[in-house]
Image: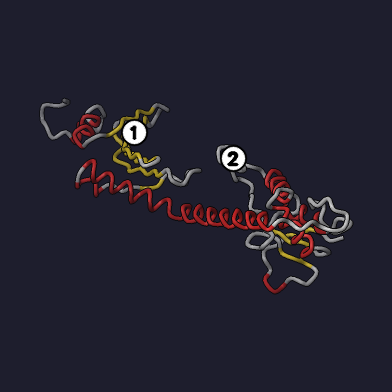
Amino acid sequence: MPVRLQGAEPAAALSTACAYVGPRSPYANPFTAGDRSPSPAGPPMDAEEAVDLFAATLRGPVGSLYADEFARALRGLDLMCTCPLDVPCHADVLLRLANAPGDGNTISTSNSMEGPAMPHPIMVSAAEHLTAGEQRRAAAREAAFHTWGPRSTKAAAHFARQLLGSEAATLEWQTLGLLSFEEHLQAFASLDTVGGQHLELYYSDQGGTESITLRVSCMSCPSQHVHEVTSLEQLGRLLSQTPAWQFINPREEGDL
């Protein structure tokens, strides 16, 4: 009986009795632990849930088109993936699929006793277009993942110059980390830490609505104050309420 093996893609080292089904292979599981699937708002999946979703997809209207192909290609072979052998892996699903009694496909949707039914051409065309669309969207998400940070800092610098003037060019914007939705850009720029308070500017662009806020955080307690910044003068008024004012106030008579 074929078994599951662990290993990275071994290039030419695989024997003809073993097939690599891990990442970057035609048989890879598109769902991984940590993904928020099938709902972007849902909690991250664990390894078992990712494997279950893979099995459910192969039983679906699109996945079933691949099930027969997988079963024929992998029948009788040991399957190798990068997953540790003591955690759930989609290779176990493929082993059962490829080595089931009969035609080797326990996920077949055909009710015919004389062989699989021929799908209508429009069904095949719809499945192909759906698959192509999913691939395009996946490529777009991958591109957004790699460009999110630079786009965030560039947008923050541009908007800060518009809102606060040329001196905003001295701000050093940094990314906050990738969000679960790629088009919500965020960045921050540290201003100062004085009098037990840390001051930062935060930039946000959510759905085309840009804003900059001043966040004043207490260094010895959990309190934090957030104020929207609407102009350079208004930023000065916000700063006048912080301990930093005694160091930056250009007037001798004290607080405003």
At 69% from the left and 46% from the top, the residue drawn is 53
For disc 2, the neighbor class at 10 Å (few under 14, some 14 to 19, many from 20) is few
Q: In this rendering, does residue 33 appear at all?
A: yes
Query: Front-most of 252 and 176?
Result: 176
Query: Front-most of 11 and 102?
Result: 102
Task: Give the colouring mode of the picture.
Answer: secondary structure
Is 31 above or below relative to 192?
Answer: below
Q: In the image, is 3 to the left or to the right of 251?
A: right
- Tell me residue 166's x, y (percent): 19, 47
For disc 1, the neighbor class at 10 Å (few under 14, some 14 to 19, many from 20) is many
Query: Front-most of 147 and 247?
Result: 147
**Identity of the amino acid at label 2?**
Ser
At 46% from the left and 53% from the top, the residue drawn is 144
For label 1, the SS is strand
- Tell me residue 24's x, y (percent): 63, 62
For label 2, the SS is loop
N-terminal of the pair, mark 2 or mark 1, is: 2
Residue located beneath label 2 in the image: 39
Q: Which mark is residue 215?
A: 1
Name the mark nearer the viewer: 2 or 1: 2
